[in-house]
Every structure is written in C-alpha cells, then in structure tokens.
Image: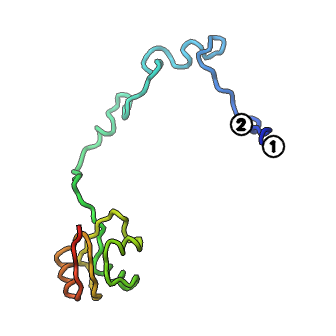
Amino acid sequence: MKLHTLKPAVGATHKEKRLGRGEASGKGGTSTKGNKGGQSRAGYKSKMAHEGGQMPIQRRIPKRGFKNNNRVEFKVFNLGQLEQLAEKYGFTEVNLENLYINNLINRTDKVKVLANGELKAKLTIKVNAASEKAKSAIEAAGGSIEIVK
C-alpha cells in the first residue's frame, strides 16, 4: 500500500448533483428552487431570528431585570477560609500574588474579605476590599489589613 494508491471505500463518495445544467439533467429550469420569490434568487439570506411570520421568541418572552455594566465582581474569601489557607499553605501574608501562585484566583480577579468564620492566625492581608467586620476581626487576631487598588 502506497499513499498515492489510497482511495475512499466503495460507496463512501457520491457525485455532486449539478443543478441548472439544462432540462435533460432533470435539475434544469428552476434548479430545484421553485418558482419566483426571494428564496429562488441569488444572494438570498433569511433574516436573523425570523420565524416565518410567527412572533419571534425575543418578542414573546418578557424582559426582566437590569444589568449594571459598572458592577465590580469580587472573588470572595471568608475569614474561615483564610484560616484554612494559612494552615494548608503556611501563609503569614495573604496577598493577590500568593493567591494567584497557588491557583486560588486568576490574574485579573479582585479579592474581597468577608467576616464569616473565625480567624485565629496572625495574618498580614493585602486585598482589594474588605467588610468592616472582617477588618475588625483581623485586627483583633493581631493581624493587619491593607486595601490595595
């Protein structure tokens, strides 16, 4: 067997139907496109979301709510989670670089600390945002928190 002798299996390929090549071909005249109208003409393209006169789905379904384009999405860490991370990874300082290196956040994520759970470890924390309760709990545990932009 050589590369230049390879052929598809018998019956695997079909001849292309040649449309509009005279009446004798059986596909002449209107070339299977029917009579008149946009769909029989060259360059026809149906409109996006057109449903043949039926009310389109984007008009049938009611609109709800509002999407704020200026919303800032934060990756949230609770105090309990920070405690676990300090034990697992041996953190003394929690900053964006440490979290990224350990695959806990993406490079562009913003981080916010919330006050759920307990923090016993003395940590230095540098994040984008923190709640007031979280700040006071971190300082009560002997740590410090810095908000970076």
Up-down: is 2 above or below 123? above
Looking at the image, residue 27 sits to the left or right of residue 56; the answer is right
Asked whether, in this view, residue 65 is left or right of residue 56, the answer is left
Above-or-below relation of 38 to 102: above
Image coordinates for residue 140, horizontal then vertical, percent: 19, 87
In the image, residue 38 above or below residue 147: above
Q: Which residue is mark 1?
A: 2
The image quadrant of residue 2 is top right
Instruction: Report how far apart the C-alphas of labels 1 and 2 lie in the structure.
Output: 20 Å
- The residue carrying pointer 2 sits among few (fewer than 14), some (14 to 19) or many (20 or more) residues within 10 Å by Cα, namely few
Which residue is painted at 62% across and 11% down in the image? Answer: 22
Residue 50 % position (x, y):
37, 31
Q: Is residue 30 left or right of residue 137?
A: right
> Do the CB atoms of the residues marked 1 and 2 lie less than 8 Å apart?
no
Amino acid at dot 2: Ala
Q: Nearer the viewer, residue 103 or 40?
A: 103
Q: Residue furthest right?
A: 1
